[in-house]
Amino acid sequence: MNKFSFVILIVLVVLCQSCSEGETKNAAMRQAPSIPVIEVPSQTLTGYDTYPTSLEGVISSSVRAKVSGYITQVLVDEGQAVKKGQSLFKLETQSLDADAAAAKANVEAAKVDVDKLKPLVEKGIIGSVQLKTAEARYNQAMATFNSISANIGYATIKSPVSGYVGAIPYRQGALVSPSDPLTTVSQVDNVFAFFSMNEKQYLNMLQITEGESLDDKIGNMAEVELELVNGQIYSHKGKIKTITGQVNPTTGTVSFRATFPNPNRLLAHGNSGKVLIPKIYEDKPVIPEASIYEEQGKTYLYKVGADSVAVEALIEIEAKVGQLLIIEEGLKKG
């Protein structure tokens, strides 16, 4: 009989009892306990390769002030839905208003000079140089006024896109500058899940996916799942949409982007988790996880031969699916 069966480790108990000093070498040996054995079945299972991921809104726009100033009003709250062009913050404009008034006065004074010199030039009383100089001063004054007026307009900070407001780190009274992000507005009806895999994993995935070109293979890839940080599986499946196809020379990885629907806004910009990519193992020998033990980084179990003697066997595990282990080497079906 050439079939081998293996012994489930958790019930493999060796009962050792101390011998008294008076025992002799001819004492009868205790009968070994019977150990249940099972035949190794072959099954087709679906497992998952997991990859850490970070989530981003399909559109995520950072909101910043174009001018420095103190925040006088925060017009929205975190998580609020806003429309493109909606006012989010207002900055203090008192000093700008004073600058604008002074600039407007300069414009009016320069215009008076131009209006006064024009008829004199037309009558030939003075040369045109004085008029051109006055017109230049007028244009400069108008440019200064327009710049200050624009800055006053920039004091009302508006949303660049429609979406949902993120965290607001600065509140009323805070001094902000163009380098300070005031918040983020994201569209999260769908979210992007960014992840990466090493070159070997990438090539293996391409080899088992149908299609001639990379675009064909991406279109034929199975739907993926998302494991949230609390261990729960997100209710909607996603689809891999883009692959860079280039190995990052620094990290040795290839970047992927999957898209998940988010109709209930349960996912947010900045969330993290794991992308689960299904992998089918066809007609593979499997054993319960409880039947193995590890020693010095290697995996062993006991298998029984034709003489009903259990012997230690070194095995290699290909994958774990639930409580079952898929055997790669060291054990065959039967």
Image: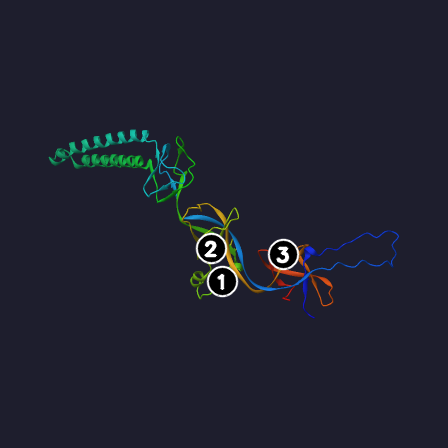
Q: Residue at x 52, y 53 (%)?
A: 51
Tell me which numbered mark, 2 or 1, is placed earlier along the sequence: 1
- Is the C-beta separation of discs 2 and 3 under 8 Å? no
289 and 137: which is toward the camera: 289
In this image, 35 relative to 165: left or right? right
Tell me which numbered mark, 2 or 3, is placed earlier along the sequence: 2
324 and 88: which is toward the camera: 324
Q: Sort mark 1 into few (<14), some (14-19) or many (20+) by Cα contacts within 10 Å.
A: some
Tell me which numbered mark, 3 or 1, is placed earlier along the sequence: 1
What type is the residue that disc 1 sits on?
Answer: Leu
Dot 3: what SS?
helix
286 and 124: which is toward the camera: 286
Q: What number is the disc on residue 289?
A: 3
In this image, 49 relative to 214: left or right? right
Residue 173 at x, y = what percent?
A: 39, 30
Residue 264 at x, y = what percent?
A: 41, 47
Dot 1: what SS?
helix
The type of colouring in the image is: rainbow
Name the residue beneath numbered marker 1.
206
> Which is closer to the viewer, label 3 or label 1?
3
* Residue 73 location, quadrant: top left
Mark 2–mark 3 distance (CA, rounded to whole Å): 32 Å
* Residue 77 location, quadrant: top left
